[in-house]
Amino acid sequence: MSTPSLAANPPAGRLRIAPAAVSLPAEGISDRDHRRIRSAFGPHLVDTYGCNESLALAYGCPSGWLHVHGDWLILEPVGPDLRPTPPGQESFTVLLTSLCRWAQPILRYDLGDSVLLRPDACPCGNPLPAIRVRGRAADLLSFPHRDGGTVHIVPMAIETLLENIPGIDLFQIVQTAPTRIRVRILSAAEVDRERQWTAVRKEMVALLTAHGAGQVSVERAHEPPEQSAGGKYRVVIPWS
Ligand SMILES: [Zn+2]
């Protein structure tokens, strides 16, 4: 297979490969990252979902969903109390049961990912359960709900929101108190930063309000996103 866009414009000019297919394992990535990888490596992307305990949990379909290999394992989306999360809602975590390894069966193992189970039939025609993976539960932002209880917001909900605002190279949400967040942005050089911040703030407030957490204050940080000790940029840093 050829990868014309990469061959024509390799990042930094060092990587010159032509993969037949590129597999995206582990938890999900944002639509923007998906487009970036596709533009670099060509159209042959394969979305998969796996973990160390079971390398193949689900496989991507043309409709953009991951179909669980439900004929040989069970994935249960559950809330913080480990009770089932209804289809159509984002779970707090997901439990894996796999009996295919007789010497080491896995029973309701907590994978730590938030997933959404499609409530209806997938248009691709695959009858196996269809999910979307929203990311690690450890990265969930939690706020008090205006009517009591707690609301959880997954990083991908914020990524999906902010990727539509032009000129954001990198961002990071830091929860500095139970009802306060700071937004760190690394902007592209040519961008009107005041205008960009107005758009970011408006979108963040709308997202929080839609989740019942409209009382949360949204602050503009003047420092850029920061790396963790391991060198990663975390999209969100929850209050702890
Ligand atoms: Zn499908």
Image (tube, rainbow, N blue to C red):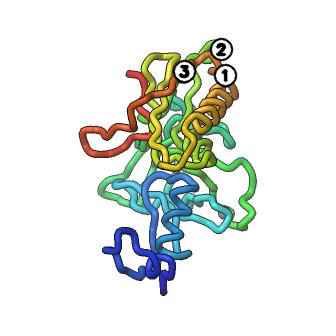
Q: Tell me the element at label 3.
A: strand
- The residue nearer to you, when weighing 100 against 96, is 96
Label tally? 3
Q: Quadrant of ligand 1?
A: bottom right
Residue 211, image x, y percentages: 66, 27
CB of residue at label 3: within 8 Å of ligand 1? no
Q: Tell me the element at label 1.
A: loop
Q: Quadrant of residue 175?
A: top left
Check contact, mark 2 vs mark 1: CB within 8 A: yes
Residue 142, image x, y percentages: 51, 25
Residue 74, image x, y percentages: 52, 51
Looking at the image, which residue sits at the far bottom? 1
> Around disc 1, counting alpha carbons within 10 Å, would you say few (fewer than 14), some (14 to 19), or many (20 or more)?
some
Query: Which residue sits at x=63%, y=55%?
Result: 129
Q: Sequence order check: which comes first, mark 2 or mark 1?
A: 2
- The residue nearer to you, when weighing 125 against 37, is 37
